[in-house]
Amino acid sequence: MKYLDWLSIWKREFKGYNTAIFRQDFLAGITVAAVALPLALAFGVSCGASASAGLITAILAGLIIGALSGAPYQISGPTGAMTAILVGIVAKHGLPGMWVTGFLAGMMILLIGLLRLGRFVAFISMPVITGFTSGIALIIFLDQLPAFLGIPRPEGESVAQRVLALFHHTLTPDWHAIVVGGIVIAMMIGLPTKIQKYAPGSLLGIVASTLLVVLLQWDVKTIGAIPRSLFLDERLDWKALSTMNEFLLPAFSVAALGAVESLLCGAVGSKMTGVRLHANEELVAQGIGNMAIPFFGGVPATAAIARSSVGIKSGGRTRMVSFIHAIALLLCALALAPLISRIPLAALAGVLIVTAWRMNEWATIRFIFTRQFKSAILKFLVTLTATVMLDLTQAIIIGVTLSALFFLNRIANMRIDVHDIDPERLQARGIELQNPCPHVRVAYLSGPLFFGAVNNFNETFAHLEKVYVLILSVRSVPLIDVSGLEALSALVERMHKNGQVLMLAGAQTDVQVMLQRAGLEDLIGKENFFWGTDQALIAAEERHTCPYC
């Protein structure tokens, strides 16, 4: 495929498109819209913006990002994970700060896609992603408690500050709000799947609770006015971008989360459909979309696993699902704005509380805990704690750093097995040595020979008294870095000085290239490189006379 060739993607996707496929896409798009409507409203409110901002984001993401997406099943919009970051940004910098952050994050995601760096996002380990997701779920749950209980939302930049602020005042919950939120939770959890297949429990719960509030005239807080326009009165203007330097760090958090969540959504969709996600095209789409959305007053968006999987399960085949869902949401905003404005905030809190519970990757959590993978458990818990207690940027950095340290520690334990010649074992393999020398050693190296493994390498070969020929089997060494080359060079020079011979067997192509670049191929001698240890043993017997025998 050509570099960022959307035309080829579209041609393959819409090849043979007909009215029957459009009918499937249309029904899937309407179903996705029914799921997305309450979530868009809830996420817009929960991040500190407005329900209108969440709705605008879902519409624009469905149209802009959907058009440029790297796969037909990706459906983007506001997500719970993103709101957990945005709520702190809005608390500290207000809506203008969130819009500048979203624009900057879009630029970063766009750059990642243009530089074709999408595959590096996949280097974040699953326990870190799971801990990060669970931490975000906990933040959403804690942030929705005030709305669910019908009490004022406390001030604070972090979730810890906001939770502590709750206990500084006498709590007087409003039982009307609790009933409203409880109805939504009950319908989302309790309604049979066969009913929710056609009408999501979140939507039915919101309709039921809103009707209850209207009929009984309960005094609970509602969403408020929904503008009948794609352009909100409050939105990003170009002058605000002059303050971009202040928002680089939070923008990095938003960009990292947006890229990871979009590619994870693509991985899930790929498994469900068998259609590969073009990662870099997807990231470019996310970048362009997030650069445009702030100018309409929306919040940062990302690909949403819940909406995308609903579209797939509903029979959607192409990105028309994303377009139809966006148009359906737009029609709702234009036609049903007065009704939407009367939705209680407690109902949206109920939606988000259930969403937060479902966000947790329970299968992965059970797996790492029941199988007692200690390093995975530690990474999960540390990332979860950092996500809740610290800034989410720090949580990402801490989780990735911890994963890197565990990984380096594991691969640094290079296994080196040194063996004397065993004539019987060689004979069993069809190798006959006439005079097997007791001063020939074979060392089998397993793992990368890099800076973390150099100490082990040096210690193993520190004492080579009465060893005439040392054969290093490096077939299981996938790479060697400068530190490894330096250690090997020092070993060769020391052995030559002592009149000893070093042979290498089974060097992989990448290792061979590095040895050539470092001049070690000439230092060791091309005649001392062999395909396998068998040939090296035979050559050691034929060529050399041991001074110790």
Image (cartoon, rainbow, N blue to C red):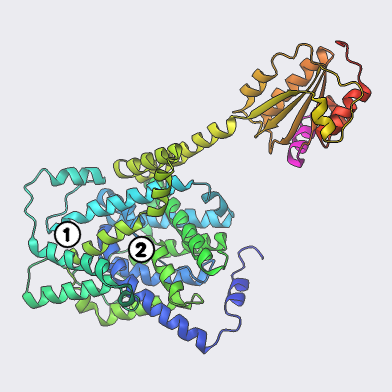
Residue 268 in the image, given as x and y percentages of width and height: 48, 62
Instruction: Give, as a three-letter code, the residue at label 2.
Output: Pro
Residue 49 in the image, given as x and y percentages of width and height: 26, 60
Residue at horizontal 69%, vertical 39%? 478
- In terms of sequence position, does the residue under pointer 2 or pointer 1 come before the other? 2
- The stretch in magenta equals 508-520
Circle 2: element type: loop
Magenta segment's dominant SS is: helix
Front residue of 500/231: it is: 500
Residue 57 in the image, given as x and y percentages of width and height: 36, 67
Which residue occupies the extreme bottom position in the image?
A: 19
Picture layout, residue 534 above or below residue 142 = above
Q: Which residue is mark 2?
A: 78
* Quarter of the image that includes the N terminus: bottom right
Q: Residues within 10 Å of mark 2 (few under 14, many from 20)?
A: many
Q: Quadrant of residue 336?
A: bottom left
Give the alpha-carbon distance from disc 2 to disc 1, as whole Å: 21 Å
Front residue of 153/423: it is: 423
Q: Quadrant of residue 471?
A: top right
Q: Which residue is mark 1?
A: 148
Q: Is residue 462 left or right of residue 294?
A: right
Front residue of 455/121: it is: 455
Instruction: Give, as a three-letter code, the residue at label 1.
Output: Phe
Residue at horizontal 58%, vertical 76%? 13
Q: Can residue 476 be seen here?
A: yes
Q: Residues within 10 Å of mark 1 (few under 14, many from 20)?
A: many
Residue 547 in the image, given as x and y percentages of width and height: 88, 11
Q: Can residue 230 be seen here?
A: no
